[in-house]
Image: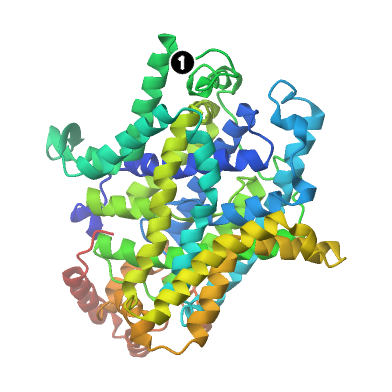
Amino acid sequence: RFLEKKGLWTCKGRDISHFLTAMGGLVAIPLILSEGLCLQHDLLTQSHLISTIFFVSGICTLLQVLFGVRLPIIQGGTFTFLTPTLAMLSLPRWKCPAWTQNATLVNASSPEFIQVWQTRMREVQGTIIVASCFQIFVGFSGLIGFLMRFIGPLTIAPIITLVTLPLFDSAGDMAGQHWGIAFMTIFFIVLFSQYLKDVVVPLPSYQRDKKCHFSPIYLFQIFPVLLGLSLSWLLCYVLTAAGALPASPAAYGHLARTDTRGAVLSQAPWVRLPYPGQWGTPTVSLAGIFGMLAGVISSMLESVGDYYACARLCGAPPPPQHAINRGIGVEGIGCLLAGAWGTGSGTTSYSENVGALGITKVGSRMVIIAGACIMLLSGIFGKVGAMLASIPIPVIGGMFLVMFGVIAAVGISNLQYTDMNSSRNIFIFGFSLFAGLTIPHWASKNSTLLETGIIQLDQVILVLLTTGMFVGGLLGFILDNTIPGTQEERGLLAWKRCHEGGLEKSQLLSKVYDLPFGIGTKYCNVSWFHYLPACPKRRPCDKRMDELKAAGQTNSVKASLERNSEIGADTRI
């Protein structure tokens, strides 16, 4: 009631903005994964994957906002799982049959084809489910705080940078279907995100106190990818209608036509409810699990940084350790659900939506909850996924060039905390990054030289050595923790200082980060509960309240605490 009185829980139409901001990343993952699953010529199944990832992202967002870190942060598919997944699918056992590469030979409804792609998807599902158990354990056991002592910027930088660098081949192939359309998409995205980002667009809106009025919105800064895709898509439609693009499937630029992928709109059902095990019972192999753990660790480290950034932009106190532990644990549960439903990826916090909070200036949980509900509805309505699956290939390629480049740059930006005038740091990052590109390239071409005679061990070695983020991250971790260097030189002091805040009132921390519906105050208010890593520690005021309760003097103290909390709890959460 206090936050509603302050006007901090009104959505003001921002719920749809978070959904649209996350849309680019959610669509990209199934489209990239479709090649490894032998689905590049089955647009209907691609649309089902897109719908499934929207649906699961909505569920995971609700869990995170209500029971996780409790900050207004969107959950969605993560690129950190893509690299180990594609490495696993590149094993000889999972290589796509030659006939699945020919569109004329593929019958999407045939039992043989369904068996081909579903066996691969079930393997990916089982790997994600097992790897997510590790994340659940790390989160709820409080081990994430212990790991952060040894993992610094020089470990994180090569890991995140190597998430998308190996995907240059896929991005280039898609953009190369028509470089003119791809560059037009890049032009629009760069124009909106960089040159027009400070242009305010007045849009009609409605508020109870102001009625109908025009609100200034940084439209281009919030939706650069969506606007860029839409305009390029429209351009492809105009060129297709005008006959400017070739109709022959063998001609260059044919895949830029909108009618080559438009048939999926009529094939997709209006309503389709994704459910766990929809692709069959998940299977597990040892090779995929070890590779996926590298993606899990990268996802956890990225999410911790997102929690602090989100709290800072919302005007909330920095998240306490118990909230971080709970957030990582709930993300692990989200990955478990993603594996059960079969999205082909895990879930993580979306950095782009954290940035959107700083633009919209609305850091309300209700806004994110409304956005999560829109994701759930989009996952149920099959036509939404079909429409997104019908985007022309060169348009997707142009988006990938921008998106993957930005993700690689985000990884490199972690070096700002280190002393890059130090030859030690330059060596560690440069060697880790280059080895993360070279070793996987060599291992994929010389897999026979790595054979030990034990099939399971051979698969584990091959997946690990062909996963660039694992190779680069492991080398960065070992070198950074063994080569002598000061805490300041390694960037650990600046890293820690960035993630610290001043002393906050315990009542304010309780308002923001404690569990909802009285779970943390009424039902779990027992002494042993406070020793759990995912639960708030027992505060001195709690002990004093217990003493006063025994003396029958709690009413006056409660009134005083409520007055003090209203004075100091002016936050946007």
> Is disc 1 surrounded by few (<14), some (14 to 19) or many (20+) residues within 10 Å?
many
**Is 331 on the left or on the right of 134, as rendered?**
left
Considering only vertical position in the picture, is 365 above or below 518?
A: above
The residue tagged 1 is: 245
Percent coordinates x, y for residue 98 in the rendering: 76, 34
Nearest the camera: 203 or 460?
460
Under tag 1, what secondary structure? Answer: loop
Q: How is the image coloured?
A: rainbow
Considering only vertical position in the picture, is 74 above or below 233?
A: below
For the point 59% across and 67% down, which residue is it?
471
For the point 36% across and 56% down, which residue is it?
72
Nearest the camera: 327 or 366?
327
Q: Going by the picture, which residue comes out furthest to the top?
A: 242
Nearest the camera: 363 or 9?
363
Quarter of the image that includes the N terminus: bottom left
Considering only vertical position in the picture, is 235 above or below 112?
A: above
Percent coordinates x, y for residue 70 in the rendering: 40, 62
Q: Quadrant of residue 228?
A: top left
**Three-letter code for the amino acid on which mark 1 is drawn:** Leu
Quarter of the image that includes the C terminus: bottom left
For the point 55% across and 23% down, which residue is it?
270
For the point 33% across and 75% down, which residue is it?
420
**Is 209 on the left or on the right of 345, as rendered?**
left
Q: Is residue 107 visible?
A: yes
Percent coordinates x, y for residue 235 in the rendering: 37, 21
**Is 422 on the left or on the right of 316, as rendered?**
right
Q: Is residue 295 visible?
A: no
**Is 96 on the left or on the right of 353, as rendered?**
right
Percent coordinates x, y for residue 31 in the rendering: 55, 38
Nearest the camera: 162 or 237?
162
